[in-house]
Amino acid sequence: MTESLNNAVLAIDGGGTRCRVACEVAGVIHGVEVGAANVSTDFEAGVSQIKLGLDQMSGKLGLGVETLLACPAFVGLAGITDQTIATRLRDALGLTRARIEDDRPAALRGALGAQDGLIAHCGTGSFLARQNGREMRFVGGWGSVLGDEASAQWVGRMALSLALRAFDGTQTRSDLLTTLLSEHDGPAGIVRFAGAADPAQFGAIAPKVTMAAQDDDVVAQHIIQAGAAYLADTAARLGWSPGTALCLTGGIGGQYASYLPENMQSDLRAPLGEPLDGALALAKEVEHEHC
């Protein structure tokens, strides 16, 4: 493909699990996917993955990377905590017409489109956000050490912590906790795992918890209920009220639906799109800003 990139836009959406690069040309979206890109936990690795994605995209479009980098772009990445790191990333990639932020605005716009409402995003990390007209407000997303409640990694950590307490005899045992102790060769194995595991590895435990909850494991249900309580309380603090649309997004987000208060459940809406859709929409705003 060698067509002109007039009116083309570039979008990059990256987090602790994967990074996706898309270019919309003449209404057609071309995309590639590479590895994790969190520029806070590992800047160089994140940049490497993004460059890999850009190289693959340039090959798919049949043009040089420099042409691609000149497109209006929105970059939404986990780990963009301030303008300093955003500028460092811009310089490292060589982007010339880009808005660089964390990964939350793209997720919010992708889920709601232009509509007002809230999202509770629970993937490897987590955050809540509200959109009201062009105003966006965000809560959470502070990472696995200080936050990310109700995320997949939080669920995994909680399960392992309760498994250790069950071994000590201060927590009721359940099939889930017995299984986790066995799979890690006892408490010492859990401690070794936790000392070296990254958020994605903790998050990989979450499906076992959600499946156990569906099988009526009381400990697993307690974990999911605790996550849902955090989401409900935080959504209310963000201004949610009955009648306000609420989307649950991210790999584990939907698992909380039946644990939310009944009045909140009635306002749940399916996301209109994915974060990459939101990133493309925001890239078009960058295009208009430079017209």
Image (tube, rainbow, N blue to C red):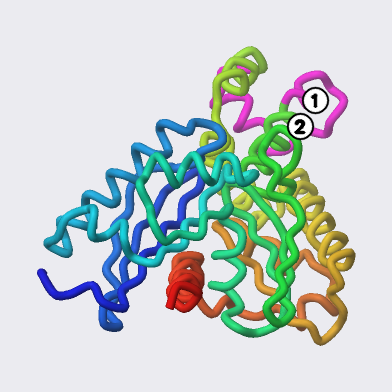
What residue range appears in magenta? Answer: 164-186
The circle drawn on residue 55 is: none
Q: Is residue 200 visible?
A: yes
Q: Nearer the viewer, residue 194 or 124?
A: 124
> For the residues marked 1 and 2, what is the alpha-carbon distance in whole angstroms?
5 Å
Principal secondary structure, stretch drawn in magenta: helix
Q: Within 10 angstroms of label 2, few (less than 14), some, or many (20 or more) residues?
A: many
Residue 187 spot, x, y in % from top left: 67, 17
The circle drawn on residue 162 is: 2
Q: Is residue 252 magenta?
A: no
Q: Which residue does the image show at 72% across and 78% down from the upper left?
A: 117
Quick one: SS at disc 2? helix
Quick one: SS at disc 1? helix
Locate the C terminus and report the quarter of the image it occupies. Answer: bottom left
Q: Which residue does the image show at 68% across and 43% down from the upper left?
A: 155
Q: Is residue 139 left or right of residue 60?
A: right
The image quadrant of residue 251 is bottom right
Residue 287 spot, x, y in % from top left: 43, 74
Q: Is residue 15 left or right of residue 254?
A: left
The image quadrant of residue 247 is bottom right
Locate the N terminus and report the quarter of the image it occupies. Answer: bottom left
Please determine whether, in this image, residue 181 is positioned above or below residue 130: above
Q: Is residue 277 visible?
A: no
Q: Is residue 179 magenta?
A: yes
**Amino acid, disc 1:** Arg
**Amino acid, disc 2:** Leu
The image quadrant of residue 49 is top left
User: How many marks overall?
Assistant: 2
Residue 10 spot, x, y in % from top left: 36, 65
Residue 280 spot, x, y in % from top left: 43, 71
- Residue beneath disc 1: 165
